[in-house]
Image (cartoon, rainbow, N blue to C red):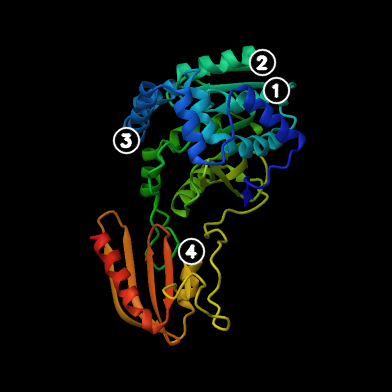
Amino acid sequence: MILLRGTLAHSPLQEALHDHLAQWGLRLFSSDQAYARWQRQELSPDELSALHQHVERKRHGSSADETAFYDLTASPRILPVLYSQRYEYYVAIGRIVEAHLGEAMTILDFGCGPGILTTFYARRLPHAEVTGIDRSAACIAQAQRKADELGLKNVRFVCADLVEGPAIGTYERVVATHALVQSERDPGLPSISWRTFERARDAQAQAAFEDRTGLGRRLDRVAAALVPTGRLVVFEKTRQLSRRIPLQRAFSVRGLKLLEPPRPIRYSLVEEVSDDGPLFVLALGEEPACAWTEDPEPDEGLPFDRVGLTSRSSGPEAPLYENHWPSAQREWEQLHDRKVIKEASAEESDGRQLHVELGTAEGYRYLYCANTFDQRQLVIVEPAQAAMLHTYYQEIIQGSA
């Protein structure tokens, strides 16, 4: 996994990115408090209120509400303040994507927004003709103003609907970052049951996901924009397995092949750590370098260490062992002498399942929780702490009712 914070070594590429972001007026903050203070200094109460209202409408509204939000963010006063939250995103994605553009002569940035990274690619690759496309007229106008200000002659911006508009030409490289899957809240495809991470090959469920999120229509457009030897670089908010698998299946059914293993990327939105991605590098006309996998990523959950098991130093109430990662399922399955005290499973009409159980194993008490959207949790305590697990069990049951 690429982790940005703490690794800001000042390579020439990163220096160029920092300089570029500064020319857009973006600033790097390490604390929410400092960022909020700067935000209040730069924007009036009315501007902040309008921005918050548009954020809520974007989350819960229509495509028109989303476009209205991006139109507002393109305001010269609001843009640097809002997009400074994403400073580390731009550094992380800008340097990785730029490395995959190579000697391409034609590049498309699909869903370019106000053109912050589009203009960076044009500056770094003066030999290439770079095109940015977005449906927000205000974003496109701001992007063109900044390109003119930077003296860039090798970039153009086009305002067009990403789905319904006319053909967008063909390119040697197409970049789509946070542009294909337009619903951050869609949970994706559930697994067959809470016992497995495996998904059924259900064409109807796959088509429904692609329709709900707009993925199918947008991916058709970008695939059609690739020349036969072209490459597609995609980075979406699909870290969860339930969203990554339908995204990968959408790639595969359209003949897109993996040129390198998908790359998870972690960066900070001021103080909040964001696990996005993974980043995919794909092609239509080349042999795949690696096969698709639908297994969970390797995670940070430690194995249950029976030999060195001791209470955590955080206090006497701390569990002996706790794992909130997919690997919790493996550790649960490997518990010796496991006996269930009580358990409950629930299934909703849309196929969501939740299972929670209390039990004994190896002289300890445990609680295990799993659902069909890949969440797993295993907690192990001394028998004297059993009441704590019973309380937790009831909270989970009541919360799912």
**Alpha carbon distance from label 1 to label 4:** 42 Å
Q: CB under 8 Å between callouts 2 and 4?
A: no
**Alpha carbon distance from label 3 to label 1:** 36 Å
Amino acid found under the numbered disc labelled 3: His
**Alpha carbon distance from label 2 to label 3:** 36 Å
Kindly identify the residue that appears in the image at 63 percent across and 26 percent down. 22
Give the mark nearest the N terminus, 3 or 1. 3
Kindly identify the residue that appears in the image at 31 percent across and 57 percent down. 351
Amino acid found under the numbered disc labelled 2: Leu
Secondary structure, mark 2, is loop
Q: Can you identify the residue that label 1 sits on?
A: 123
Secondary structure, mark 1, is helix
Specify whether 18 is left or right of 391.
right
Q: Can you identify the residue that label 2 sits on?
A: 150
Q: CB under 8 Å between callouts 2 and 1?
A: yes
The mark lying in front, picked from 2 and 4, is 2
Give the mark nearest the N terminus, 2 or 3. 3
Q: Can you identify the residue that label 4 sits on?
A: 326
Q: Can you identify the residue that label 3 sits on?
A: 60
Give the mark nearest the N terminus, 3 or 4. 3
Amino acid found under the numbered disc labelled 4: Pro
